[in-house]
Image (spheres, helix red, strand yellow):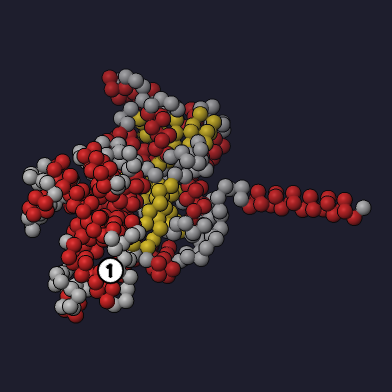
Amino acid sequence: MARPVLALFALALALLLADCSKRAGEEGFTTEPEVQIDLDQIRERGFLQAIVDNNSISYFIYRGQPMGYEYELLQSLTRHLKIKLKIKVISGVEQSIDLLNKGEGDLIAFPLTITQERNKYLSFAEAQFNTCQVLVQKKPANWRRMPPARLERTLLRNPVKLIGKEVHVMNESSFKERLTNLSQEIGGEIIIHEDSAEAETESLIQKVAMGEIQYTVTDQTIGMVNAIYYPNLDVGTVLSSPQQIAWAVRKNSPDLRGAVNEWLAELKRTGGFTMLYNKYFNNPRSSQILIASEYSSVGGNKLSPYDEAIKIEAKNLGWDWRLLASIVYQESNFQPNAESWAGAVGLMQLMPATAEQFGASDRTDPRQSLRAGARCLKHFDKLWNKYVTDPNERLKFVLASYNAGLSHVVDARNLAKKYGKNPARWDDVESFLKQKSNPKYYRDPVVMAGYCKCEEPVKYVRDVLNRYEEYKILIAAT
């Protein structure tokens, strides 16, 4: 009889543990920190991993340049902390909390509403601003021809009239919580549809504009910007009292929270915060240009008018076109008539001798400039292939050679070799490239090209590759 009793006990225990496990994780995300990473550890590794919302305000590419309200604030924060910024774009609050508590992010840079429920899982920084939740609804088809008073009568203004109506919201969002409470307040059920965890607020706003759903809810700030892009939308029905918007960190990261609060207070005191807020939320014309432009990652998938030509030359190089595009932006900001103080001209900033060597008779011609620049890059790649077999490492040597000239990079490699470092590892060679303004090194017998203030090529490599990583987040590969 002992075995059946033990078997029943084991089964009961398994069911109990399964039930406890379900209750512990029923929120669908990790509710407690699984790592101990605070400001000291972040500074030691040299970068802040920020989790950013996937919307048209927080982070996007416009004419090759990363932009966005959250992005610019994060740039300011990491400059203040003297560390680098890495970004992870996520859709959905649940997933962002999960990644944060698992240590895959340090800071949720979402426009998060501070709620009592979220305070259980997160430590909020000081509020950035207050907003309210608004209903997003579509205006009638002939709204442009309607007198304002008549148009107003067609729109749902009294929340009581939401009883029995279907409203779509993001999964586990504060919008769902507000609608649930609103149903109790108005004495009738609002039919709440939660979209998948991957759904974005702006995708639901678009569905309302296209007539696919009737209503959604969003923050007033995001709603007003999207109403510029979709003029057939109305966001004038307020559904909540003012709510605080803030970023959040893990509950066991008090030093990071303190540093964020210190930085934010200083930014507000000096007026930088107000200027940035106005840029993205209080400048309708600017917002419309940014959102609607085909050269915005929000409105399209283009970086410049020369994308197709860049793709052709990138294919000849065997490169991702977004990498070559990052070089073009770094060189000329996609301006075919750009000219440097040193006489470099065109999209790829070719000097006369380089243009002649690689076949560009007119350096201001976009196609000629791109073709010659790509040939030059391919030339450097072949040269370095003999010495640097790792393609990721070799790319850095190629970029530095394009910017500073081959001879200075060869000098730095020779110095690395002389001083016992790895001449095929960019970090080792880079350190000697930066020393080429020091007489001890530029007068060394292994150095042929002499003095160079070579901080620029080091920065060039870093900037091109960082921008490429940002392009990969928001711009499609094809």
Q: Which of 146 and 404 is in front in this view?
A: 404
Task: Give how far across and how far down residue 27 sits, in percent.
Answer: 58, 48
Give the residue drawn at x 34%, y 47%: 472
Give the residue drawn at x 48%, y 47%: 93
Residue 34 in view in this figure: yes
As drawn, the residue found furthest toward the bottom would be: 440
Give the residue drawn at x 21%, y 65%: 409
Q: Which of 207 and 192 is in front in this view?
A: 207
As drawn, the residue found furthest toward the front would be: 386
Task: Give how far across and how far down residue 17 sits, in percent.
Answer: 71, 53
Q: Based on the displayed image, in which of its 4 quarters is residue 422 positioned?
A: bottom left
Residue 438 versus residue 454 in the image, above or below: below
Q: Nearer the viewer, residue 410 or 245?
A: 410
Residue 79 in view in this figure: no
Q: Is mark 1 on a helix, strand or loop?
A: helix
Task: Give how far across and how far down residue 307 sits, in percent.
Answer: 23, 40
Q: Based on the displayed image, in which of its 4 quarters is residue 416 positioned?
A: bottom left
Residue tagged by mark 1? 429
Horizontally, is 400 left or right of 11 in the view? Answer: left
Residue 263 versus residue 199 in the image, above or below: below
The quadrant of the image that shows the C terminus is: top left
* Dot 1 amino acid type: Val
Give the residue drawn at x 28%, y 60%: 386
Q: Residues within 10 Å of mark 1 (few under 14, many from 20)?
A: many
